[in-house]
Image (tube, rainbow, N blue to C red):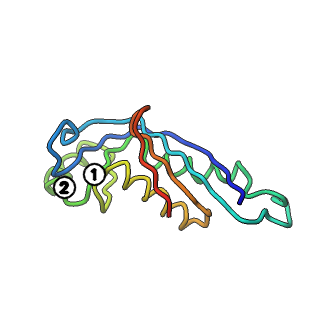
Amino acid sequence: MYELKTEASFDSAHFLTDYYGKCENLHGHRWRMVVHIAVDELQREGTMRDMVLDFGTFKRYVRALAKELDHTFLVEEGSLAPSTVAALEAEGFSLTVLPFRTTAENLARYACERLRAQGLPVSQVQVDETPNNCAVYRP
C-alpha cells in the first residue's frame, strides 16, 4: 500500500446544539485537516508514472475544501431560527449550513466524503479542533 498525506488549516466558528457545556456557545477554532490517500499500485503511465498522485494536485483539492470552510460560521441545519439566519446573512456574515452537528468527527467524515466524490482515494481524514484534540475518520 502506498500512501500520501497533506494538510490544510482553516478558521471558522461553530456551536454545538443540544450540548450542555462551553461548546454550546458560539466559538471559533483554527481547524487543521490532515488527509491521507492510499492506493495498492502506483500509476503506470504518463506524467504521474510511479506516483500515487502528484502532490500539487492533491494539495489543490485539500486546500480548496479548506478555503470553502475558512472564515465562515459552520451552522447545523435547523439549529438556528430562520430569522436568525436571515439576520446574519443580511449583516454580511458568511454561513456554511451543514446537514449535521458541527463536531470534529462529522467534519472529518464530511471532508472525506467531499474529497472521495472528487475522485481522491482518501483513506483517512484527521480534523484537529485544538493542538491537543483531534477526530479521525476512515471510510
Residues at discs 1 and 2 in contact (Cβ within 8 Å):
yes
On the image, numbered disc 1 is attached to which residue? 75
Instruction: Tell me what residue is drawn at x 85 percent, y 64 percent.
Output: 46
The amino acid type, in three-letter code, at marker 1 is: Val
Say what amino acid the circle numbered 2 marks: Ser
**Secondary structure state at the residue bearing disc 1:** strand
Q: Position of residue 73 (x, y in %)?
A: 31, 45
Q: Is residue 1 left or right of residue 106?
A: right
User: Residue drawn at (16%, 57%), measured in percent from left and top?
Assistant: 82
Q: Nearest the camera: 71 or 106?
A: 106
- How many marks the image carries: the answer is 2
Mark identifier at residue 101: none
Could you say whether the residue bearing mark 2 is in a helix, strand or loop?
loop
Compared to residue 116, the image places residue 102 above or below, namely above
* Farthest top residue in view: 131
Residue 79's label in the rendered image is 2
Q: Position of residue 100 (x, y in %)?
A: 30, 60
Q: Is residue 69 above or below residue 120?
A: above
Observer-nearest of 76 and 101: 101
- 112 vs 72: above or below: below
Image coordinates for residue 84, horizontal then vertical, percent:
15, 50
Tell me how far mark 1 sits from mark 2, CA to CA.
7 Å
Residue 13 occupies quadrant? top left
